[in-house]
Amino acid sequence: MVVEETQYHSISNKENIDNAVMDYSKIGRTVKSALLKAQAESRVIVGLSAAIKVLSNAPEGSLFCLMAVPEDGDSAMHMHEVLLEAFCYENDIYVIKVDSAAKLSRILGKTDMESCCLVQKSWSGDDQHEEQLNKSENLLVDYCEAFWDSPQHPIVELPNV
């Protein structure tokens, strides 16, 4: 799927919202940056089983679910991934499909192949009701919102690590 440039609203400065053109060719680097920052803050849940466990207990704490394009083979694993994706959409968790489980695993510093991860929300101070998004996360929210109602979401090409 070819991703065309589209307009979005930057929500980082709520008092002065300007229209800008988002460069989707760089979204893979934005995903990597957001993942590394969240990982440094211990907000990344890695692996399908771990993600399902966290979501079954507290789905409201998750911001993004990154899922690698499934490879042919294990139909049971594919079924779990499809159900996880549907659960995320039902609970307003942004799903970002990435091109490679190998690249995702390398970015996360994992030696085992991981097909998905969750990025947990970051809360401002003691108030558990107000999310605090960094610049990369704001861009990813805008990216996800642009494709929320699309029947098919584009696959993000992650940079080689």
Image (cartoon, rainbow, N blue to C red):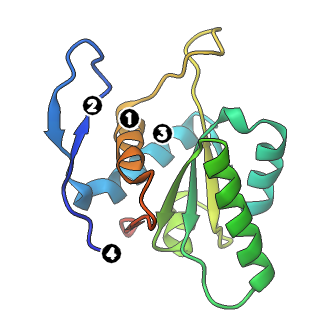
Binning the other alpha carbons within 10 Å of mark 4 as few (below 14), some (14 to 19) or many (20 upward) gives: few
Q: Do the numbered discs 4 and 3 sit on residues whose CB atoms are within 8 Å? A: no
Q: Where is mark 2, residue-wise? A: 10
Mark 3 vs mark 1, CA separation in Å:
13 Å
- The residue indicated by pointer 4 is 1
Mark 2 and mark 1 in contact? Answer it, CB < 8 Å: yes
Q: Position of residue 78 (x, y in %)?
A: 71, 77
- Residue type highlighted by circle 2: Ser
- Marks 4 and 2, Cα distance to the nearest angstrom? 24 Å
Image: 69 above or below 144? below
In the rendered structure, which amino acid carries the disc numbered 4?
A: Met
Point out the frontmost of discs 4 and 1. Answer: 4
Front position among marks 4 and 3: 4
Going from the N terminus, do you reach mark 2 or mark 1 first? 2
Q: Which residue is mark 1?
A: 138
Q: Quadrant of the C terminus?
A: bottom left
